[in-house]
Image (spheres, rainbow, N blue to C red):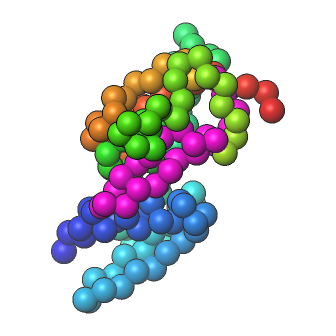
């Protein structure tokens, strides 16, 4: 049986939001075990690979710049409301924990925050873009804390 990807995405998003590293989920005879940030050494193949990292380093040509990527499938929103200014724009200095964007997953809005202090170099996604895990959303330059 192939698991429903929408359910998997929602479970992974919830795990990340709550900082949970392992989750067992059962419903209607379907059992899913998700593990983030760890290797499963059991002989059975895992149902889902660990979640992708949010920040990924660019090639060596731009050593000081990295991208902030979409953590899961969803709709990218740059601002908190249609008539509001974006959370960040190129050139902005962002503190750790500052909101960067909103990701809508299954009609649930999640405010995604910066995991480290940085300067926004470029916005790579447009408002209301559909994104997948690993889609680059911003190019940033990390700052020393």
In-front residue for pair 63/72: 72
The stretch drawn in magenta includes residue 28: no
The residue located at (45%, 69%) in the rendering is 34
Q: Where in the figure is residue 112, as x and y percent of width and height?
A: 52, 47
Residue 30 seen in the figure? yes
Relative vertical location of residue 20 with respect to residue 25 in this rendering, above or below: above
The answer to whether residue 44 is above or below residue 86 is below
Where is residue 69 drawn, in percent x and y? 46, 37
- Residue that appears at 32% across and 49% down: 74
Q: Give the magenta range.
A: 98-119
Q: Main secondary structure of the magenta part?
A: strand
User: How many callouts does the rendering have?
Assistant: 0
The C terminus sits in image quarter:
top right
Residue sitting at x 52%, y 23%? 89
Asked whether, in this view, residue 127 is left or right of residue 116, the answer is left
* Farthest residue, direction top: 61
**Quadrant of residue 2 within the rendered picture:** bottom left
Q: Residue furthest bottom?
A: 29
């Amino acid at each position: 049986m192939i698991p429903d990807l929408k359910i998997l995405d929602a479970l992974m998003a919830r795990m990340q939001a709550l900082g949970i590293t392992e989750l067992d989920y059962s419903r209607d005879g379907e059992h899913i075990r998700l593990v983030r940030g760890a290797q499963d050494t059991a002989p059975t193949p895992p149902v889902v690979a660990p979640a992708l990292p949010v920040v990924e380093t660019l090639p060596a040509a731009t050593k000081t710049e990295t991208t902030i990527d979409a953590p899961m499938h969803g709709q990218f929103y740059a601002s908190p409301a249609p008539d509001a200014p974006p959370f960040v724009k190129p050139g902005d200095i962002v503190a750790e924990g500052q909101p960067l964007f909103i990701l809508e997953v299954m009609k649930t809005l999640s405010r995604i925050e910066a995991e480290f202090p940085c300067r926004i170099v470029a916005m790579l996604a447009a408002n209301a873009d559909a994104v997948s895990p690993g889609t680059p959303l911003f190019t940033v330059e990390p700052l020393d804390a």
